[in-house]
Structure formats: C-alpha cells, structure tokens
Image: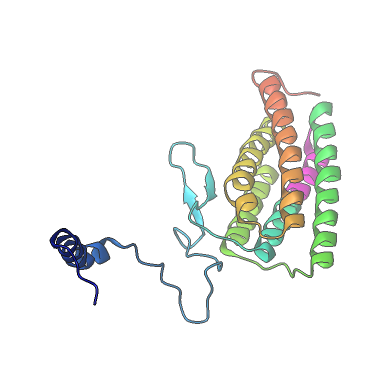
Amino acid sequence: MIQLKTRDVVIVAGWLACLPACAKDEPKAPYVAPGASVGDEAAPADQSGMATQQSTGTTTPSPTLITNDAQIVQIVATLDTGEIQQAQLAQTHARNPRVQAFAEQMIRDHTQSKVKGAELAQQAGVVPEPSDTSRALESKAMQTLQQLQNAAAAAFDPSYMRAQVDQHREVLNLLTDRLIPSARRADVKSQLVTTRSVVQHHLEMAMGLAQELQGQPPAH
C-alpha cells in the first residue's frame, strides 16, 4: 500500500474540494437543435438577416450569421445578378460616357463571376442554397434598382455611382468578414479571394467616378 505524506494528502484534498467550483466555470457547448449541425446557418439578428447601421442608412449582413458553401455560392450569384441588372439600366440611362463605360465593365466582370461560380458549384457538386442573407441582398438590390428607375434623368449618374460605392463597400466587408472565413472547400475560398480583389478594384473605380460627378453639371 502507498503511504502518502501529510503534505500530499493536503494537496489532494484541496484539489478535490476545487472540483465543484471549477466545474461551474467550465464553458458550456452551444446548443444545437435536433437535426441541425454546428455549421448550419445561425439565426440572424432580425427577420431580414441584416443588421442596420443607423448612421449611414446602409445595411450589412449580421456578423453572427454563419454560412455554408452552398449558401455562399448562392450569395455571390445573387450579388452578381443585382450588379448586372443595375448596370444594364445604367447603359440606357447614364449620360456620362465614363459612367456608361463603368456599367459596361460591371456587366462584363459580374457575368464572368457568375459563370465561374456556376462552373465551380457544378465541379464541386454544390447545389446553391438560398439563405436569409441572399434573400436580404436580393431585396436590397431590387430596391436600389427601383430607386434608380425612378430617378430624374439629370440625377441618374451620381445616384448610380453612389449606389455602386455603397454596394461594393458592403460586399467587400461581407467577403472579408463572413464569406471567406466561413468557406469550407479550398476551391470555394480561393474563388472568393479572387472575387474580393475584383470588388476592391470596382470600389476604387466607383469612388473615383462618384467624386468626379460631385458638383458637376449633368452631361448632355
């Protein structure tokens, strides 16, 4: 039989006494509903899945939202569709030749992005899955499109370019903060990184044009 020294007995007794208190501090695992998995999309901050920034009036996807690859593919496709539709409107309504050229590039780049996304999804066997985020983004893009359709002819160019600045800034944040970190497949993540570079370039172009149009009379 092993004989414990008095000092050892005191140490063991102190450790046993600590167990209940230590157990109280142990973090609990997050609750997962039956039939769901840890990677499933979490509940959004509100019914739209978007968090509103009252200072600017713009909206961005909730930072608590977790997406999977199928939802990510659908989100990017939704963003591409919205950009293409607005750019098509700009081609027929814009007066400034540089704004028209910008719209043409948006159609070209976002059409290419949409095709690559569809090819990637097919190769990876990923079926695009709608989510609160994709639905909220689609709704917001349609709202912007309607506002541009109702804009006065002289106000269309600056209105379109301001919308482009806001949208590309929002998409850049979405890619950086949520989509790229949430992507599970390496090929999906790689495509998102490429898309982020394109979006960054679009944002810089839009900001430059928007600044040029400030205070300028409408082109005839």
Magenta-colored segment: predominant secondary structure = helix
Does residue 153 appear anywhere in the picture? Answer: no
Quadrant in the picture for residue 108: top right
Q: Name the residue at 13% across, 62% down.
A: 6
Colour treatment of the image: rainbow
Q: Name the residue at 85% across, 49% down.
A: 112
Q: Along the line of sight, which residue is nearer the eye, 68 or 98?
A: 68
Q: Name the residue at 72% across, 25% down.
A: 209
Residue 105, percent from left and from top: 84, 38
- Look at the image and tell me in which quarter the C terminus lies: top right
Residue 35, percent from left and from top: 52, 81
Would you say 203 lies left or right of 104 here?
left
User: Which portion, as a residue range, is magenta?
Assistant: 83-96
Residue 76, percent from left and from top: 71, 54
Q: Along the line of sight, which residue is nearer the eye, 196 or 52?
A: 196
Does residue 216 appear anywhere in the picture? Answer: yes
Would you say 33 lies left or right of 199 here?
left
Image height of 110 relative to 133, above or below: above
**Residue 92 within the segment the image draws in magenta:** yes
Image height of 165 relative to 137, above or below: above
**Residue 173 within the segment the image draws in magenta:** no
Residue 44, percent from left and from top: 48, 61
- Look at the image and tell me in which quarter the N terminus lies: bottom left
